[in-house]
Amino acid sequence: MHKLLSQLVLVVELSINGWTPSNLKGPDALKVHKHNQSYTKEFKLKCIKAYLNGQGSYEQLANKYGLRGSTQLKNWVSKYNSHRRLKNYYPTPEVYKMTRKKTNQQEREEIVKYCGTMI
């Protein structure tokens, strides 16, 4: 069924397979999210242990634990298996926003002159 559907709408079959469990969450599952989710180190380890103990596939566990997708869990398991440190993650917009330096007209002209000498 997924193969036929993927051919009809020209979408990779794996994408449709990933969308199917999202249907359990209803139409809200396909909404664009404005903010990243917050996950504690303990929560990540709980999900990782469940996968490593064979309690389900990436997709099943992502749905069980309310992750937006299975890729998140795959990344956590990969980090865990490569002995990289898992950290708590609390998204704060201030960290990701850089403010540009305010310049006046004279400073901008000097920058343009300087860049012109570089060419």
Image (tube, helix red, strand yellow):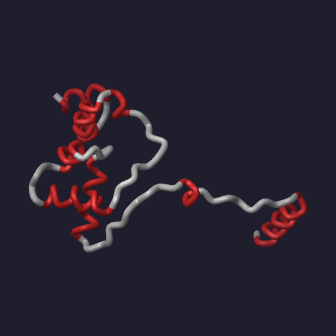
- Give the x, y percent position of residue 53: 10, 59
- 50, 21: nearer the viewer: 50
Q: In this orientation, which residue lies closer to the viewer: 27 or 108?
A: 27
Q: Position of residue 90 (x, y in %)?
A: 44, 57
Is 25 on the left or on the right of 50, as rendered? right
- Where residue 95 appears, as percent x and y from the top left, is 55, 60
Q: Nearer the viewer, residue 62 or 46?
A: 46
Q: Residue at x 25, y 72 (%)?
A: 82
Instruction: Classify residue 79 as left or right of residue 108.
Output: left
Q: Quadrant of residue 64?
A: top left
Above or below, 84 against 88 in this view is below
Residue 100 rendering spot, x and y as whole percentages: 70, 59
Residue at (15% x, 49% y) in the render: 57
**Residue lying furthest left:** 54
Q: Quadrant of residue 51?
A: bottom left
- For residue 83, which quarter of the picture? bottom left
Foreground of the two, 46 or 68: 46
Split into 4 quadrants, where in the image is the C terminus?
bottom right
Quarter that holds the N terminus:
top left
Report how many numbered discs are placed on residues in the image. Answer: 0
Residue occupying the point 22% across, 58% down = 46
Residue found at x 15% / y 56%: 50
Q: Is residue 48 above or below residue 63?
A: below
